[in-house]
């Protein structure tokens, strides 16, 4: 059997890079998707995954653009075959309190963090259902579950991600396609490094495990849900937050 093909959006990012590595170690052929404008980071990424001997590749695309995503998936399928695994890890922040938030800060974030999931899933779901196999994992956030000061846009989008996951999971459950959410807590990534040090220190003090999460902590959970034998888990949210938010 050919290697299963996995597409990871935000694939060269703080979490995405490690997700690509975990999937490749699990025997997937991996294609990382990210913005073409991140040229420096793309070069660094190529170096970081060079030891995987071609199992991890990079293709540029903008997840906020539906037509771009359609062309992307058509191109990938023509070159590599069907997409079996889709990981939606592309995300941005535009943190500011609501009273200062501009419509642009709201819409930019929605276009990437929420529209992006529609734009990519819409391209692959039909083929997955026809072939009787698919694994979709969408990245939400603990801040979608709890809300965070300065993140009305981000919290709304990330809560929306899991609503999307649950609805699509119902639509595909009979077809061998699972759809799940992973909700990271605060992790050691550039996104969290951008939070003011005093705020960040307060947040870390509130994490029961006593540290930021590592990208590997998140990638492990994503790879678990993306495994071939994870077929009875669907519509679930897997929190990976060091105990920062516990719920049942
Ligand atoms: N909690 C309580 N009060 C806060 C606050 C907070 N987190 N942040 C600001 N305030 C207070 C301010 O001290 C200020 O008080 P006064 O009016 O009494 O002086 C008041 O709220 C008004 O603040 P502003 O509207 O001026 O907002 P700001 O510009 O000072 O701060 C912010 C906005 C920088 C976004 C700040 O709220 C903040 O850092 N929030 C946390 C952002 C955060 O955690 N982002 C996560 C990014 S990483 C990520 O998202 C990954 C993931 O999934 C976990």
Image (tube, grey):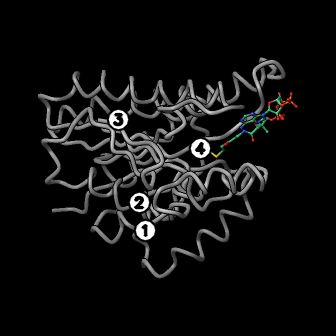
User: How packed is label 2: few (under 14 Cα within 10 Å), some, or many (20 or more)?
Assistant: many
Name the spot of residue 160 as percent of width and height, x first. 47, 24
> Can you identify the residue that label 4 sits on?
61
Front position among marks 1 and 3 = 1
Q: Label 3 to label 2, Cα distance in Å?
A: 22 Å
Residue 1 in the image: above or below residue 186: below
Residues tagged 1 and 2 counted as in contact (Cβ below 8 A): yes
Determine the quadrant in which ligand 1 lies. Answer: top right
Q: Label 3 to label 4, Cα distance in Å?
A: 15 Å
Identify the disc placed on residue 21. 1
Residue ID at (84%, 22%): 100
Direction bottom: furthest residue: 51
> Can you identify the residue that label 3 sits on?
124
Q: Relative to 85, is 231 on the left or the right?
A: left
Quick one: label 3 or label 2, which is nearer the N terminus? Answer: 3
Quick one: label 2 or label 4, which is nearer the N terminus? Answer: 4
Front position among marks 4 and 1 = 1
Name the spot of residue 177 as percent of width and height, x first. 21, 37
Residue 111 occupies quadrant: top right
> Can you identify the residue that label 2 sits on?
219
User: How packed is label 4: few (under 14 Cα within 10 Å), some, or many (20 or more)?
Assistant: many
The local secondary structure at tag 1 comes to: helix
The local secondary structure at tag 2 comes to: helix
Residue ID at (59%, 41%): 91
User: How packed is label 3: few (under 14 Cα within 10 Å), some, or many (20 or more)?
Assistant: many
Quick one: label 1 or label 2, which is nearer the N terminus? Answer: 1
């Amino acid at each position: 059997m050919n290697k299963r093909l996995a597409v990871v959006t935000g694939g060269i990012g703080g979490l995405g890079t490690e997700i690509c590595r975990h999937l490749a170690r699990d025997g997937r052929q991996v294609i990382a998707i990210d913005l073409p404008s991140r040229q420096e980071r793309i070069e660094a990424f190529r170096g970081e995954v060079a030891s995987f001997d071609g199992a991890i590749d990079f293709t540029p695309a903008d997840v906020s653009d539906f037509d771009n995503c359609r062309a992307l998936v058509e191109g990938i399928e023509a070159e590599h075959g069907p997409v079996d695994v889709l990981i939606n890890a592309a995300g941005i922040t535009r943190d500011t309190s609501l009273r200062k938030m501009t419509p642009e800060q709201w819409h930019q974030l929605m276009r990437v963090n929420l529209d992006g999931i529609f734009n990519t899933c819409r391209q692959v779901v039909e083929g997955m259902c026809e072939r009787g196999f698919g694994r979709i994992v969408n990245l939400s956030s603990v801040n979608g579950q709890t809300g965070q000061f300065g993140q009305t846009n981000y919290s709304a989008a990330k809560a929306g991600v899991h609503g999307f996951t649950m609805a699509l999971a119902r639509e595909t459950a009979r077809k061998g396609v699972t759809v799940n959410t992973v909700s990271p807590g605060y992790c050691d990534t550039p996104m969290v490094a951008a939070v003011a040090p005093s705020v960040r220190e307060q947040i870390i003090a509130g994490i029961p495990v006593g540290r930021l999460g590592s990208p590997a902590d998140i990638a492990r959970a994503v790879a678990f849900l993306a495994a071939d034998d994870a077929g009875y888990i669907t519509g679930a949210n897997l929190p990976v937050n060091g105990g920062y938010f516990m719920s049942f």
